Image (cartoon, rainbow, N blue to C red):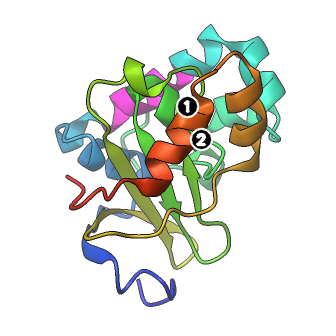
């Protein structure tokens, strides 16, 4: 975690996951408080979310949809090939929309924040935050943040699509996310 300079002052703890190529999905499972064995379900949930709204996601992703779909479409029990690893930060949109959470992605090169695209603050009963870090360039971990921590850059595509695609409450989410002290993230 030392490779991400800003993290040491806000990181309460991080949870290491097995390095089998599924660590990104295991980190999501840990953030959502699901059983660690449910990482395959996370892959399936995200794949189904993508397939349910291909037109919308085609407009959002700067990645080719087939690349994202390919990375999610794997159910092997052994080491996962690199082309099937979690693709971040772009998959943040799927995570945020599927689980109605705010996704904070920490990395050396592209830290970001992503909100659900088509939900306003009134649509989410509990504001949960999923925090995932990419360490060593090839391993994802769950991170618990503490105290009042700064909001990282909001993904530019969220600004465009979250505020223009009928989400009239997008500005409220931005204001809420930027001013609320989130405390310890579960």
Q: Is residue 65 visible?
A: no
Residue closer to the observer: 166 or 97: 166
Identify whether 183 is placed above or below 8: above
Q: Is residue 55 left or right of residue 177?
A: right
Instruction: Determine the residue positioned at 83% across, 25% down.
Output: 59
State the image quarter where residue 8 is shown. bottom left
Q: Can residue 163 be seen in this view?
A: yes
Q: Distance between the residues labelled 1 and 2?
A: 5 Å
Instruction: Determine the residue positioned at 40% across, 18% down.
Output: 123
Crowd around label 2: few <14 · some 14–19 · many ≥20 (10 Å): some
Instruction: Determine the residue positioned at 45% across, 24% down.
Output: 98
State the mark number for residue 91.
2
Q: Is residue 100 left or right of residue 166?
A: left
The residue labelled by disc 1 is 94
Identify whether 12 is placed above or below 100: below
Q: In this view, does 66 lie to the left or right of 152?
A: right
Percent x, y of residue 15: 25, 66
Q: Is residue 43 magenta?
A: yes
What residue range appears in magenta? 39-47
Instruction: Determine the residue positioned at 51% across, 37% down.
Output: 173
Mark 2 residue element: loop
Percent x, y of residue 32: 26, 40
């Amino acid at each position: 975690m030392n490779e991400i300079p800003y993290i040491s002052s806000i990181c309460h703890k991080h949870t290491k996951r097995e390095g089998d190529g599924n660590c990104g999905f295991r980190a999501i499972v840990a953030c959502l408080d699901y059983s660690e064995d449910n990482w395959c379900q996370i892959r399936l949930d995200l794949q189904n979310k993508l397939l349910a709204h291909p037109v919308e996601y085609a407009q959002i992703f700067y990645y080719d949809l087939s690349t994202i779909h390919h990375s999610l479409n794997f159910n092997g029990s052994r080491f996962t090939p690199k082309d099937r690893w979690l693709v971040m930060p772009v998959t943040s949109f799927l995570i945020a929309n599927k689980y109605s959470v705010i996704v904070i992605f920490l990395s050396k090169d592209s830290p970001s924040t992503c909100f659900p695209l088509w939900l306003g603050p009134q649509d989410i009963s509990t504001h949960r935050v999923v925090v995932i870090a990419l360490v060593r360039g090839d391993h994802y971990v769950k991170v618990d943040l503490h105290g009042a921590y700064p909001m990282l850059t909001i993904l530019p595509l969220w600004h465009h699509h979250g505020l223009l695609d009928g989400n009239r409450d997008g500005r409220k989410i931005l204001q809420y996310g930027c001013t609320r002290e989130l405390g310890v993230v579960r």
